Amino acid sequence: MKRRLAALLAALQLLACAVSASAAEWDPTDPNDPLLWEPDLPEFDGPMPSTPRLGETEDAFSIAVSFTGDMLLASLHGKRAAGNFLDYAAKQEPEYFLQHVRPIFEADDFTVVNLENVLTDRNLTPKEKSTDPAYWFRAPAATTDILTSSGVEAVSLANNHTGDYGTAGYKDTVKAVSAAGLECGGNDRTFYLEKNGYRVAVICHGLWTEGQAGTITRRLKAAEKDSDFQVVFYHGGAEGVHTPEAWRVRASRRLIDNGADLVLGNHPHVLQPREVYKGKEIVYSLGNFCFGGSRGPENRTIIYQLILRVENGELVSAASELIPCYVHTGGRVNNYCPAPIEDEAQARRVLDFMDGKAKLPL
């Protein structure tokens, strides 16, 4: 296992750290990536455990981890208006939003999502933004009930909206998810999922420039010492396009070259295909999932499910399942209630798109 090699690689890692400030590793800051100043994430207090399934033993078992794209559980400026997310939240129980995917999330070992909004009960001042148009999203802290009531265990906060209300809003968000018992990751905090001693590291980070792959690589090297399998769950890329930029392809492949076992992207708000590079999967965008940022988001997404088989402490196999889903089930209007696609032809088109056999997922 990788942890067993850590001591042998220690000298090489120290050397890598010594040269990490070179021009090749330059990591420019992006004013639209608030998590580059990541404030005060809580200290890692041990991996999130899972319980064995029926028929499994401590020496022979599987680990199933579900990942989704952007979950924006909020509305613009935290204001309720007819038909927007917070209007639905005021009228529905928390279980409403993920009711159709809850069986999937509850059947796996862990579910990890990208939480793309601020959670706060305070009337905070929005952070100034240089982009035009610009958007600020927030919701009450109790919104975490949507996640905890439906089998979600962990969230990434490494995105461009958890900083919409500055450091105070970000800290409130961390406090809210932590109080709800959710694990969280960000630009300087890796979290770990563990089952029967086998540990999966989830490295959440912004990827707004090709150079930021250098920072993620350094985090990968650090995580290898404490885990057996490493997942990079990044946020970045152009919005609204179904093809990844050339620089992001290079950056994602570089992460595989430097030890990532799986690379998953989000932020474009639409699906982008996957590829197998040197035997490892890269999904360039998981798209939106439960998404309160638009009344009419593109209505196709997936749940990416990672399935690991471990025997006697060693990884025997790593596989994946892509579960095609609707972003919403409200016809032409977003009702913020995603669901698996039961229509075989529609589901097949999504899968064909993800494997590069179709130009669009719908």
Image (cartoon, rainbow, N blue to C red):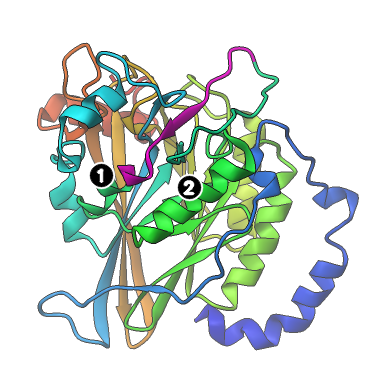
Residue 71 visible in image: yes
Q: Position of residue 188 (x, y in %)?
A: 63, 58
Q: Is residue 65 magenta?
A: no
Q: Amino acid at mark 2?
A: Thr
Q: Position of residue 80 (x, y in %)?
A: 33, 20
- Disc 1, SS: helix
Q: Is residue 326 left or right of residue 231?
A: left
Q: Is residue 332 left or right of residue 218?
A: left
Residue identified by numbered label 1? 146
For image coordinates 47% across by 23% down, the residue present is: 77
For image coordinates 60% across by 38% down, the residue present is: 249
Compare residues 95 and 287 and report the one nearer the observer.
Answer: 95
Q: Position of residue 297 (x, y in %)?
A: 34, 19
Residue identified by numbered label 2? 173
Q: Amino acid at mark 1?
A: Ile
Earlier residue among tags 2 and 1: 1
For the image, the number of numbered tags is 2
Residue 197 found in image quarter: bottom left
